[in-house]
Amino acid sequence: MLKNLALLLATIMFGLCFYALYSDKPPVFKGYADEYEIYLSAGSFGDNIVKTRDKNLNAFTVVKGESCYLNVSYEQLIKDFSATHLFTEETAEGISYYAYSPKIKYRTYIRGRMVNIQYFSGCGRQIVGTPMIFGSF
């Protein structure tokens, strides 16, 4: 009886792992852009950022975040993701807004607060990233 229970639990765990790896993984910002930058590691390492137009990220087994250019206001993005605005940073190039949404699995800590949306507006463009924008913008 114990062997059967262990076999059943092992089968269930295998199924859940298989599902997590190969189930449909659309970009977080699907519908906001045609091209995405997918982060294969955490941090601003250019060799680990891949550009794709694919609306399904199954080809990438490890995804640590993403970003895209978009034409949606920060207010609309906050509303769409039921996010909470946390803080703003202004630079010579533009303004970065930081927020947290329980709908997005990626997260990092900035200034001791959990963040998973960075929205940059400046130089005539808007970029959004999760957990934040990696690389340069």
Image: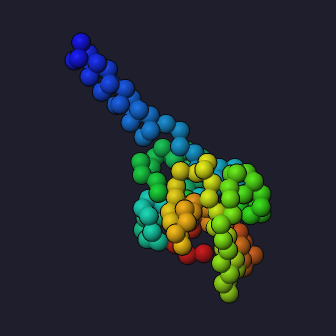
Q: Quadrant for residue 48, please give it.
A: bottom left
Return the residue nearer the eye: 56 or 104: 104
Residue 62 lies, in percent from the top left, at: 42, 52
Answer left or right for 81 relative to 56: right
Residue at horizontal 53 percent and vertical 43 percent from the top: 25
14 relative to 82 in the view: left or right = left
Please name the colour scheme applied to the rendered image: rainbow
Between residue 67 and residue 82, name the one nearer to us.
82
Q: Residue at x 57, y 63 (%)?
A: 115
Figure quadrant of the N terminus: top left
- Looking at the rendered image, the quarter that the C terminus falls into is bottom right
Q: Is residue 3 above or below residue 18?
A: above
The residue furthest top is: 1
Res 81 seen here: yes
Determine whether 109 is above or below 103 in the image.
below
User: Farthest residue in the bottom direction?
Assistant: 92
Please identify the quarter of the rendering in which residue 22 is found.
Answer: top left
Residue 107 spot, x, y in % from top left: 52, 58
Where is residue 45? Give x, y as percent: 43, 71
Q: How many marks overall? A: 0
- The residue located at (68%, 81%) in the rendering is 90
| Residue 51 visible to the viewer | no
Task: Give the left or right position of residue 43, taking residue 56 as reference.
Answer: left
The residue located at (65%, 78%) in the rendering is: 89
